[in-house]
Image (tube, grey):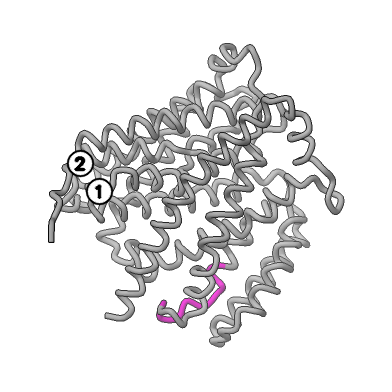
Amino acid sequence: MELQHTTTKLFKDFFESEKSSGLVLIGCTVISLVLANSVFGSTYLHFWHTNLGGQPIEYWINDGLMTIFFLLIGLELEREVYKGELSNIKKALLPIFGAIGGMLVPAALYLSFNYGTNTQSGAGIPMATDIAFALGILSLLGNRVPTSLKIFLTALAVIDDLGAILVIAVFYTKALFWDNLLIALGIFGFLLILNRLKVRNLIPYLIGGVIMWYFMLHSGVHATITGVLLAFAIPFGNGNKESTSYILQHFLHKPVAFIILPVFALANTAIVLSSNMGEVLVQHYSIGIALGLIVGKPLGIFALSFLAVKLGICNLPSDLNWKSIIGVGFLGGIGFTMSIFVTLLAFDDATIINNAKFIILLSSLAAGTIGFFSLKLTLKRKPQTFQ
């Protein structure tokens, strides 16, 4: 009973922090766009490229701070697997199939416009879902949202993030330096041994994580992967409030939601809007991203979820219907953080990166708006109770 209460409380804390974080991210994005296109634009852009320890500030945010974000994702995924929605395979299959469809269909749509071109590497961009933004929009619908729909979207987005992590590790690793990679994996193995020996003190794991990050950074594999590996090395135990995993996950929620992600948004949405944005909209990569997020996401999530239920592989919760799954599918099209992150890995051309970010913002706004009004029309308002 205590463990169930702990899990429920942690999910509630997670949902509340993601909801608030989504609203903060919107504010940071607007501020960043306004500053980038104001008289202070050049100063603002130059700030993020200021040298700090031999690298620009933007680099430390994207390769350093975002590792902590991936650590939190890993801890959330670990909890889902051991004690959450993904611990029951029958319940887990619905969001798993939804997430798979929500990754494959957008990537296929993107490639249908970009295969064989110099922008085909952007196929991973529309595969991502931004948990904070998606849950932030869902929270605006108040008490009419069934808990099972919140859980479905959360589980789907976490699986989606795992998929994005695998895509980054496999497809966006340009050159491997095996000596550094083997050292990083050796440290990971040592941390797993500490886990098996039931060492619960966080300090050796955090020190090992920093050293592993350094060698992963110089291995060719993106350093943020370290965060996920570290998460699965940290002892989960029975998942209660005293467990090492719970303590770290609980501690990281607010710093990630209200410091790391907003800073990432400020640094990476400094998009300079040019007068030829009409031309940007018809570029093959722009069409691929837009169709992937606005059409591919809801289509893929609905299609594979529907297929899995009709084949008897899993069940649709009794308080949900297919209209609500489609609505949540559109919320899955809010790419933002992860889509921008993949953009930075996919392209080298600064102009394409700038334009792709702009399309991600437009597409995420469109998908989020459609999802919100779709759910508002289909979800029944719960009657008010008066004392």
| Label 2: few (<14), some (14–19) or many (≥20) C-alpha neighbours in 10 Å | some
User: 10 Å neighbourhood of mark 1: few (<14), some, or many (≥20)?
Assistant: many
Would you identify the image quadrant in which residue 226 lies?
A: bottom right
When the figure is inspected, residue 380 is found, relative to residue 30, above or below; the finding is below
Q: Position of residue 125 (x, y in %)?
A: 54, 36
Q: Amino acid at mark 2?
A: Leu
Q: Residue at x 59, y 31 (%)?
A: 357
- Residue at x 56%, y 34% (from the top left corner): 30
Q: Which residue is mark 2?
A: 379
- Tell me the element at label 2: loop
How far is disc 2 from disc 1 in space, using C-alphas?
A: 7 Å
Q: Which residue is mark 1?
A: 145
Q: Quadrant of the C terminus?
A: bottom left
Q: Is residue 238 magenta?
A: yes
Q: Is residue 13 above or below residue 319?
A: below
Disc number for residue 28? none
Q: Tell me if 263 is positioned left or right of 40 in this view.
A: left
Residue 138 part of the magenta segment: no
The quarter of the picture where residue 179 lies is: bottom right
Q: Residue 251: image x %, image y %?
A: 53, 69
Residue 106 position (above or below residue 278) = below
Task: Confirm or deny contact between disc 2 and disc 1 (CB under 8 A).
Answer: yes
- Magenta stretch: give its range: 231-239
Q: At which x and y percent is residue 242? A: 46, 82
- Who comes first in sequence, dot 2 or dot 1? 1
